[in-house]
Image: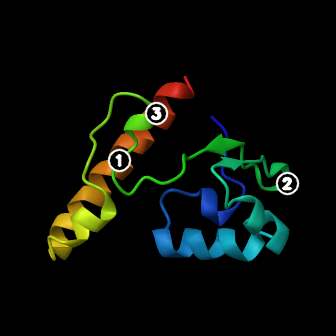
Amino acid sequence: METATYPFQQTGLPLNERVQDLLSRLTLDEKVSLIPQYQAEIERLGIGAYKHGTEGAHGISWLGKATSFPQPVGLACTWNPELLKQVGSAIGDEARAFIKRIRR
């Protein structure tokens, strides 16, 4: 198993600490390269190329079998922050499962 080199790769650390570490290591050009749906590899940080799609605010069903939620404007009309957190959590769970499945 590969050993984590940087704090952002250490899953036992708090998420905010990992995000701040990664952001501090990325150059402006690298950050800009992560904007489109197809991200190039950032070899020096051990970040592989990937595709996240155009947006995932209503699910990732364009990638395969997954839950499809209403468009963000419809979700916003619920005025229910707890429901939106649950939707976001479900989308994140499905995205992680999808990535894990394709990396096998």
Q: What element carries label 1?
A: loop
9 sits to left or right of 49: left
Give above or below for 5 relative to 98: below
Q: Quadrant of the N terminus?
A: top right
Residue 69 placed where, x, y %?
25, 49
Nearer to us: label 3 or label 2: 3
Q: Is mark 2 on a helix, strand or loop?
A: helix
Q: How far apart are marks 3 and 1 (CA)?
A: 9 Å
Q: How many C-alpha atoms fall within 10 Å of the one at disc 1: few (<14), some, or many (≥20)?
A: many
Three-letter amino acid code at the position of disc 1: Gly
Q: Which residue position holds label 2?
A: 44
Q: Residue 91 carries which label?
A: none
Q: Which residue position holds label 3?
A: 63
**Can residue 85 be seen in the rendering of this structure?**
no
Please give the name of the residue rendered at 43% of the width and 43% of the height, measured from the top-left corner: 96
Report the front residue among 22 and 82.
82
User: Which color scheme is applied?
Assistant: rainbow
97 sits to left or right of 83: right
Three-letter amino acid code at the position of disc 3: Leu
Residue 57 placed where, x, y %?
38, 57
Three-letter amino acid code at the position of disc 2: Arg
Q: Distance between the residues labelled 3 and 2?
A: 28 Å
Residue 58 placed where, x, y %?
33, 52
Give above or below for 88 relative to 1: below
Q: What element carries label 3?
A: helix
33 sits to left or right of 1: right
